[in-house]
Image: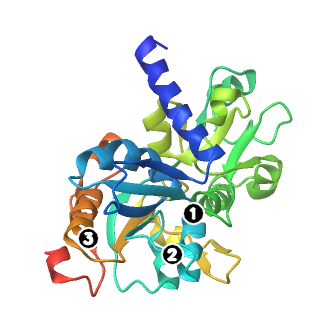
Amino acid sequence: MDGPATTRRAVLAGTAGALAAGTGCLGVSGARSDAVSILAAGSLANAVENGLRDAADHPVRAEARGSARAARLVASGAKDPDILSLADTALFDGLDADWYAEFATNELVLAYTTETSGGRRVAAADEWFRPLGRPDVSVGRTDPDLDPLGYRTLFALALATEHYGTDADLRTTVAADSRIYAETQLISRFETGAVDAAFAYRSMAVDRGYDYHALPDAVNLGTPAFADRYAEVAYDLPDGTVVRGAPISYGATIRRRSPAVREVFERHVAGDYLADFGFGVPANYPRYSAHAPVNIAE
């Protein structure tokens, strides 16, 4: 790969490393006390840090967490951000949020590196799942108890088992031997050679310039036409919440209203930067749930 792309990867890896080493805090656009705080899904970390922060007129103080964990932190009162932005709109059901805006879509892919023999084996596979579970191929995923990417990976493996008619449940043969990382660390594991492949959002692979296998529509959780099939799989979160498979959609809500918060929120859910970072933005997005304030949804 040429120099500019390598440099961009190094910058992104540094951002991910800082997140992994610290508390999940992103940069602050200014140190003023009036900075708008946003608690965002880990998969939004780079877009918020390097897209929203530059697009907003007001300073932004951002923190990235796995969405399931972020929702629990807000529900318990441990975190109280001005804006909460999650990778699964279903997680708002357990919060005191009266409304949210759906603002981006995504799909699951199997990203891989061609810098390792295991990664090249994945790259050459006619069917993406065949090399997975082999002792010479390492696979990364995220914790299903902490973020939607984790439980969506299990959903995709269950759906793939049915779609391909495999003899064994791929959740057992693949997930049991995979390595679990925080969402903000996952793709950066390619940089260290820790994994050969990883289940990731398409936005994560595109943003970082990694090769990937696209998954079938019946498996990737990114195709609305397959919503009924996706709904056949479910996962129980530690707090008792049951999440079901559904087309991937990101949602955000305002928890504390002010002109500055509204401006940042509007840039967040309707900004051109989202497509630049690999997210899908349908023509009818952002779209608002019931009870959204008129001056926000208009």
Dot 1 or dot 3, earlier in sequence: 1
Give how far across and how far down residue 2 sits, in percent.
45, 12
Residue in the image at 62% along x and 60% along y: 159
Q: Secondary structure at mark 2?
A: helix
- According to the picture, the residue beneath numbered tag 3 turns out to be 287
Q: Residues within 10 Å of mark 2 (few under 14, many from 20)?
A: many
Give how far across and how far down residue 267 sits, in percent.
24, 57
Q: Secondary structure at mark 1?
A: helix
Does residue 179 appear to the left or right of 94 in the view shown? right
Up the image or down, 39 lies above or below 114; here it is below
Up the image or down, 143 lies above or below 203; here it is below
Inspect the image, locate mark 2, and give the three-letter code of the amino acid beneath it.
Leu
Q: Are marks 1 and 2 in contact (CB under 8 Å)?
A: yes
| In the foreground, 183 or 27 | 27
User: Residue 243 is drawn in which quadrant?
Assistant: bottom right
Question: Rounded to the nearest whole Å, what is the CA distance between mark 1 and mark 3?
Answer: 21 Å
Mark number, residue 148: 1
Give how far across and how far down residue 20 sits, in percent.
63, 45
